Image (spheres, rainbow, N blue to C red):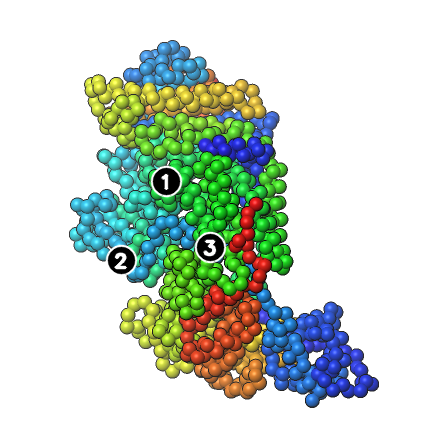
């Protein structure tokens, strides 16, 4: 973002100095702890096109259908889960329940938000799986990180309702994704930037104090001498610190990207860079990346599509023009997931063997199985990476099993053995066998 | 709970060997040297292991002589008596005991001080605010409300009604909020400003069964950027139509208006309810009162939220007289916070087209430093603080460096460093006026007056100060003066024993504070602005709740109303129930607390710390005794009475008011005796029988006037008045009396004098070149 700052830091031989009064920086994960695992849940909205998504038969993955084609390089490290259904039910329209029951597996509270059909509803009534795992990891010294979890967004409209939130810290406690990369950069590295600016002026400030002190009476000068001593000690403190804290340097973000619809592709890549960077520096092991929102009307002009995504998703199957556009849209989302996977694959695991992808599970999903029917059946679940120790390179069909059991499985892989998650009646049979 | 209190005394205990054999010297100085100096030091400074307290106070020579005659030297009390005692008393009074003598011996000087924490925050709000329009908010009485017959806000065709709502406190139950609005689906927006009565952390609470979002100190909701991130309190999604509470906390500077925008909607819900409450500093949870709301929308303010360690108050007023590592950390973090705010809202400050224009950013930095340093930069400073950064770094980095260097510079943090030597120039006068009346930086108008050389003579300066008196920042500073002078913030909990004083709850206490503030504002900002009225007014400001508790007749209107309670001899602040309660025990009055407070703060008597701390234990006394009898018994020792002769009569004169300030005529079924004889600092005996006698005493007493002048000077200027010229307090006092005790004129006079004071040489850096 600021080349000069780096220049300056090199000149001074310091970076990321820790001042006592700004938030502590991430430290390198202790070597020798139990195998490190991460989870990244990626969301894209408005259902998929089943015919262009699912393979004809369960079994080893052969040729991928068109939507998944960008993920071909990861075929051997990919698992497709068909036949999982969001069977939660209750208040709220299909999109609302699709979104807010997706990671919680539990009903919505009654409320005042009315959708296009069905009854009005409120927020989710229980915690989402990512937050459950965050609490689990933060509860133990060995897996505790600075943030515990990070919630990224891309082009999420500035509104708070059950269509726009999938992460919940608990009943009635939605967690908003940060869809501004600059805000996220500030959250991750803001204090570092401030320290750098501060480090760059302290010498001048000392000179200024000395200049001023020479001109005043001896009695008053003592005051400024004390002040000067404090400035010099701050300077020394900054200089003692080195770059040892960060394994990976702060990413350079293009500083002039406006947060508008048409910049979505660039914002997406910036967020993915920040996400990978934050995980490389072990600031978090759990992340969500939410594209738009359920019923989102993103106009993907970068794909030559002028209509809003949600409106397109309502078009009947026989509207071929709409089908083509929806294919391009979902293909684009798959490309972003592939980019995320590639970034992880190309980054060596800090302090461990292999790449980051070997220690990470990406889970890409949607609030609906199919857009124009608002179906909660066959919700697309794509798992990527080798973090969880599942047997990859295949496709499975669970024939309508409640998706709550998938969350039990993921938790299990982290060593967190939950008896049930979300609605208890939907957990019968326990974790799925993916190994 | 029994409060522990300290008895106060001027006792001068000393053990001195007798020196009888020497011939009696004839001067006070010689007598002192021979009889007293061994324990008290050659100049009354004290002697370690003997009597180490310095000998100074406010007693008259006659009172000192009586004391020496009777009690000194300790162990040989007959060694110095009668005429010799008078000689010694006159000598020490003149040589080092009296305040005048002390000032003469060690003349105070105008010290270099840094901005106080409050001045730091105020200066930043105004410095950043000088780059965009901050409208004056004058209307009061509620928020602009818009009602819509639909759950969608701002849908023009469903817009039904506009009005001003005095508060957001509605339980619509199962009904409609207004004619023409269906219960099934409606929405309301309230917008305007909230006025913070004092500086500190405010808590806000939104209670609703439905959907609501509160924006505070931001401009969200109607376009434009915002100073805070998104909604301050988000309760947009309801839950089962149940009442939910959402709270938020924000640091606000007093005397300023913050934009507020509240959106509310109810959709297919049986019941509707919305309430906006706050808990201001020193207050309790209540709906935000209409006086603190305006239907006009202000601009967001850059209030720095970095916490600061408290400023030095060892002399009784806040001043920037010390620096610590903690303060340095806070000031540095605060500067970083300010720079981040500026960068985030750069578009609003330099114009959207200026964000990426290095020339515009540079010019912003020049202006910023000019304003921060309270005078235009010279060529060397322009280069040091601004220009060279833009040569070395990309624009945004240069901007950050320049702003941070400016805000951490001693030239910003120590206002005195920007002054010129000798008679003050126009910029110095402008800077001192702004600091004295606003605790802040010069505004556009003052800067222009300085630039055009319009602050050259005393009449013009007085005129400017007069204009500045109307600014809300002046009002705020004056309000804070009364908080200090009347020690309103020293006791945080005024609660009493609920069995003895049922109904004296936090709401009553919060209303009492408001009542006292209303009274003071009413007097100070009236035409006469008469100090005497503060002491002798026979009325109280009461609202319905207070009228009920203090058994007043029903009030003619809502809100706070002037009420004279029949048969009660009230006397302004002396008998205001807030102060009577603050200076009382949990279960009883405390004549000692009341006496100490009034003798020091109002009457200007200097009391020394007590020789020993003695706790007042109510249970030690016969329960049939009155409080007066108990205190008399407790303080009857001669060593106690040196001070309690002053304290007790004042406290006893207020015994007609119980621990919560209600009028009474008897205690323990015994008629109250409030009459005592009081000896003034200049040794006159006065009979005190009631609060009104006390008021009459304070009104005519020069030492009371001097106490007021000194307190006010300290509060406004944060320096000792005697540092400006010997006799400053007395000459201000004379003008004050001539003006008919006009408080506002006194304030102007104090600030004008300090602003025009010539600076001794060799203490300014205004022209200091930079490396």
Image point (35%, 43%), residue name: B351
The N terminus of chain B - image quarter? bottom right
Q: Chain of mark 1?
A: B
Provide the secondary structure element on which disc 2 rests: strand
Q: Nearer the viewer, mark 2 or mark 1?
A: 1
Q: Chain of mark 3?
A: B
Outermost residue toward the right in this view: B21
Image point (72%, 85%), residue name: B27
In front of the other: B568 or B757: B757
Residue that label 1 marks: B354
Residue that label 3 marks: B374
Give how far across and how far down residue B621 sits, in percent: 58, 77
Residue B44, disc = none
The Cα atoms of the two marked residues, 2 and 1, are separated by 40 Å
Let me know if residue A67 appears in the view: yes
Let me know if residue B505 appears in the view: no
Give how far across and how far down residue B281 sits, in percent: 44, 59
Specify which label sits upstream in the sequence, 3 or 2: 2
In front of the other: B79 or B610: B79
Q: Nearer the viewer, mark 3 or mark 2?
A: 3
Provide the secondary structure element on which disc 1 rests: helix
Would residue B90 appear left or right of B358 to someone viewing this image? right
The Cα atoms of the two marked residues, 1 and 3, are separated by 25 Å
Specify which label sits upstream in the sequence, 2 or 1: 2
Residue B165, disc = 2
Outermost residue toward the bottom in this view: B82
In front of the other: A121 or B95: B95
The C terminus of chain B - image quarter? top right
Q: Are marks 1 and 3 in contact (CB under 8 Å)?
A: no
Give how far across and how far down residue B280 sits, in percent: 41, 58
């Amino acid at each position: 973002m600021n080349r000069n700052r780096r220049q300056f830091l090199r000149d001074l031989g310091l970076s990321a100095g820790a001042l006592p009064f700004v938030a502590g920086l991430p430290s390198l994960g202790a070597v020798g702890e139990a195998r490190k695992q991460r989870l990244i849940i990626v969301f894209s909205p408005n259902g998929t096109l089943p015919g262009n998504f699912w393979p004809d038969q369960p079994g080893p993955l052969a040729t991928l259908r068109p939507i998944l084609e960008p993920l071909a390089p990861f075929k051997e490290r990919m698992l497709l889960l068909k036949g999982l259904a969001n069977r939660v039910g209750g208040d709220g329209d299909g999109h609302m329940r699709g979104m807010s029951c997706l990671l919680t597996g539990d009903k919505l509270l009654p409320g005042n938000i009315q959708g296009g059909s069905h009854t009005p509803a409120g927020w989710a009534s229980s915690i989402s799986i990512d937050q459950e795992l965050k609490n689990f990891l933060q509860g133990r010294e060995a897996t505790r990180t600075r943030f515990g979890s990070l919630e990224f967004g891309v082009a999420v409209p500035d509104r708070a309702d059950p269509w726009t939130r999938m992460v919940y810290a608990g009943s009635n406690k939605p967690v908003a994704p940060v869809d501004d990369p600059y805000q996220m950069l500030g959250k991750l590295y803001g204090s570092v930037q401030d320290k750098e600016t501060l480090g760059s002026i302290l010498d001048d400030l000392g000179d200024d104090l000395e200049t001023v002190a020479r001109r005043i009476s001896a009695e008053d000068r003592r005051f400024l001498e004390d002040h000067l001593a404090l400035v010099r000690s701050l300077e020394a403190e900054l200089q003692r610190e080195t770059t040892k804290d960060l394994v990976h340097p702060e990413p350079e973000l293009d500083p002039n990207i406006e947060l508008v619809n048409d910049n979505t592709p660039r914002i997406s890549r910036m967020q993915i860079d920040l996400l990978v960077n934050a995980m490389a520096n072990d600031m978090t092991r759990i992340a969500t990346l939410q594209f738009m929102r359920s019923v989102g009307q993103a106009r993907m002009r970068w794909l030559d599509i002028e209509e809003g995504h949600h409106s397109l998703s309502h078009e009947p199957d026989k509207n071929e023009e709409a089908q083509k556009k929806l294919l391009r849209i979902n293909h684009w989302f798959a490309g972003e997931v592939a980019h995320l996977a590639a970034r992880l694959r190309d980054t060596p695991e800090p302090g461990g063997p292999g790449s980051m992808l070997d220690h990470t599970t990406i889970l890409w999903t949607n609030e609906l199985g199919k857009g124009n029917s608002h179906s909660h059946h066959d919700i697309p679940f794509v798992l990527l990476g080798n973090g969880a120790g599942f047997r990859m390179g295949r496709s499975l069909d669970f024939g309508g099993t409640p998706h709550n059991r998938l969350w039990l499985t993921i938790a299990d892989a982290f060593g967190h053995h939950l008896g049930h998650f979300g609605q208890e009646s939907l957990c019968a049979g326990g974790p799925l066998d993916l190994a | 709970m029994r409060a522990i209190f300290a008895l106060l005394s001027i006792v001068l205990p000393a053990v001195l060997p007798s020196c009888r054999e020497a011939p009696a010297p004839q001067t006070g100085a010689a007598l002192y040297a021979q009889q007293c100096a061994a324990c008290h030091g050659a100049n009354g400074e004290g002697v370690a292991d003997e009597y180490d307290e310095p000998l100074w106070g406010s007693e008259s020579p006659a009172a000192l002589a009586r004391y020496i005659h009777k009690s000194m030297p300790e162990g040989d009390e007959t060694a110095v008596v009668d005429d010799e005692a008078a000689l010694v008393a006159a000598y020490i009074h003149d040589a080092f005991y009296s305040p005048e003598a002390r000032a003469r011996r060690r003349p105070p000087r105008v010290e270099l001080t840094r901005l106080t924490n409050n001045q730091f925050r105020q200066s930043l709000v105004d410095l950043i605010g000088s780059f965009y329009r901050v409208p004056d908010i004058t209307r009061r009485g509620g928020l602009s409300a818009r009602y819509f017959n639909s759950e969608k806000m701002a849908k023009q065709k469903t817009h039904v009604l506009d009005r001003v709502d005095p508060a957001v406190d509605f339980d619509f139950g199962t009904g409609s909020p207004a004619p023409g609005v269906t219960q099934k689906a409606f929405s309301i927006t309230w917008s305007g400003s909230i006025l913070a009565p004092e500086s500190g952390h405010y808590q806000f609470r939104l209670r609703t069964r439905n959907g609501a979002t509160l924006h505070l100190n931001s401009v969200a909701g109607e376009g434009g950027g915002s100073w805070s991130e998104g909604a301050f309190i988000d309760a947009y999604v309801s839950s089962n139509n149940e009442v939910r509470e959402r709270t938020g906390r924000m640091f606000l500077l007093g005397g300023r208006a913050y934009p507020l925008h509240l959106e509310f909607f109810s959709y297919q819900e049986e019941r509707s309810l919305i309430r906006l409450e706050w808990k201001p500093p020193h207050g309790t949870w209540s709906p935000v009162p209409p006086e603190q709301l305006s239907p006009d929308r202000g601009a967001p303010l850059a209030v720095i939220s970095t916490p600061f360690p408290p400023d030095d108050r060892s002399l009784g007023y806040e001043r920037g007289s010390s620096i610590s590592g903690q303060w340095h950390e806070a000031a540095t973090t605060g500067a970083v916070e300010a720079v981040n705010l500026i960068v985030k809202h750069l578009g609003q400050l330099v114009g959207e087209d200026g964000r990426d224009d290095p020339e515009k950013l540079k010019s912003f930095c020049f202006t910023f430093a000019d304003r921060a340093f309270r005078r235009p930069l010279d060529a060397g400073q322009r280069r040091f603080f601004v220009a060279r950064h833009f040569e070395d770094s990309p624009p945004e980095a240069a901007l950050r460096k320049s702003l941070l260097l400016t805000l951490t510079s001693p030239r910003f943090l120590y206002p005195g460093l920007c002054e010129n030597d000798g008679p003050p120039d126009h910029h110095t006068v402008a800077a001192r006026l702004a600091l004295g009346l606003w605790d802040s930086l010069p505004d556009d108008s003052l800067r222009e007056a300085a630039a055009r050389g319009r602050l050259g003579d005393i009449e013009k300066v007085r005129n400017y100060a007069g204009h500045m008196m109307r600014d809300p920042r002046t009002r705020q500073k004056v309000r804070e003066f009364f908080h200090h002078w009347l020690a309103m913030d020293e006791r945080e909990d005024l609660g009493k024993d609920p069995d003895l004083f049922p109904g004296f709850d936090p709401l009553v206490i919060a209303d009492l504070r408001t009542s006292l503030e209303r009274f003071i504002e009413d007097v100070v900002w009236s035409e006469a602005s008469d100090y005497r009225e503060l002491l002798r007014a026979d009325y109280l400001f009461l609202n319905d709740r207070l009228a009920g508790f203090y058994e007043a007749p029903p009030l003619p209107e809502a809100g706070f109303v002037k009420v004279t309670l029949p048969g009660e001899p009230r006397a302004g602040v002396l008998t205001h129930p807030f102060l009577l309660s603050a200076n009382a025990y949990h279960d009883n009055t405390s004549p000692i607390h009341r006496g100490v407070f009034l003798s020091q703060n109002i009457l200007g008597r200097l009391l020394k710390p007590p020789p020993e701390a003695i706790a007042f234990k109510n249970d030690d006394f016969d329960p049939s005794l009155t409080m007066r009898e108990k205190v008399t018994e407790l303080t009857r020792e001669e060593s106690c009475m040196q001070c309690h002769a002053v304290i007790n009569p004042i406290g006893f004169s207020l015994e007609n008011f119980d621990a919560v300030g209600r009028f009474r005529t008897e205690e323990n079924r015994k008629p109250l005796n409030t009459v005592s004889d009081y000896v003034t600092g200049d040794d006159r005996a006065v009979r005190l029988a009631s609060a009104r006698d006390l008021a009459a005493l304070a009104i005519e007493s020069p030492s009371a006037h001097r106490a007021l002048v000194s307190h006010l000077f300290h509060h406004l200027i944060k320096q000792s008045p005697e540092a400006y010229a010997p006799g400053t307090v007395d000459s201000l006092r004379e003008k004050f009396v001539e003006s008919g005790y006009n408080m506002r004129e006194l304030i102007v006079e104090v600030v004008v004098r300090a602003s025009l004071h010539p600076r001794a040489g060799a203490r300014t850096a205004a022209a200091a070149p930079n490396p």
